[in-house]
Amino acid sequence: MNNGGFILAALRQEGLVKPIAGAEHGMNRVEPTAYLAEVQALIAAGTAIAIPPLANRRTLPVAKRAGVTAPVGTPLKRGSRR
């Protein structure tokens, strides 16, 4: 799941926040000029980014939604923990 810690780690990796000097916890915002210049260069170069379509979980077979690893059509025994 993407939570606050994940987002903060991603922002730090991209150089958009940095640790507060002398503080055990906390981050400071960094001016995004370098990041935006890098993104603009990618856009200007026509870099293609393939974004896969989102899967609607309701259209997936129940076995895939539930993460069942048994082959489709294999009956599961009651109380079985596959």
Image (tube, rainbow, N blue to C red):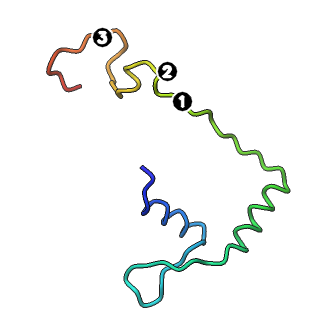
Snapshot quadrant of residue 81: top left
Q: Secondary structure at mark 1?
A: loop
Q: Residues within 10 Å of mark 3 (few under 14, many from 20)?
A: few
Q: Which residue is mark 1?
A: 55
- How far is disc 3 from disc 2 in space, using C-alphas? 20 Å
Up-down relation of residue 2 to residue 26 (above or below): above
Q: Disc 2 marks which amino acid?
A: Thr
Up-down relation of residue 33 to residue 74 (above or below): below
Estimate the x, y position of residue 49 in percent, counting from the top left.
71, 45
Q: Disc 1 marks which amino acid?
A: Ala
Q: Disc 3 marks which amino acid?
A: Thr
Q: Residue furthest bottom?
A: 22
Q: Quadrant of the C terminus?
A: top left
Q: Secondary structure at mark 2?
A: helix
Q: Which residue is mark 2?
A: 59
33 to the left or right of 17: right
- How far is disc 1 from disc 3 in space, using C-alphas? 24 Å
Residue occupying image coordinates x 35% and y 27%: 66
Residue occupying image coordinates x 34% and y 9%: 73
Estimate the x, y position of residue 23 in percent, counting from the top left.
40, 86
- The mark found on residue 18 in the picture is none
Snapshot quadrant of residue 32: bottom right
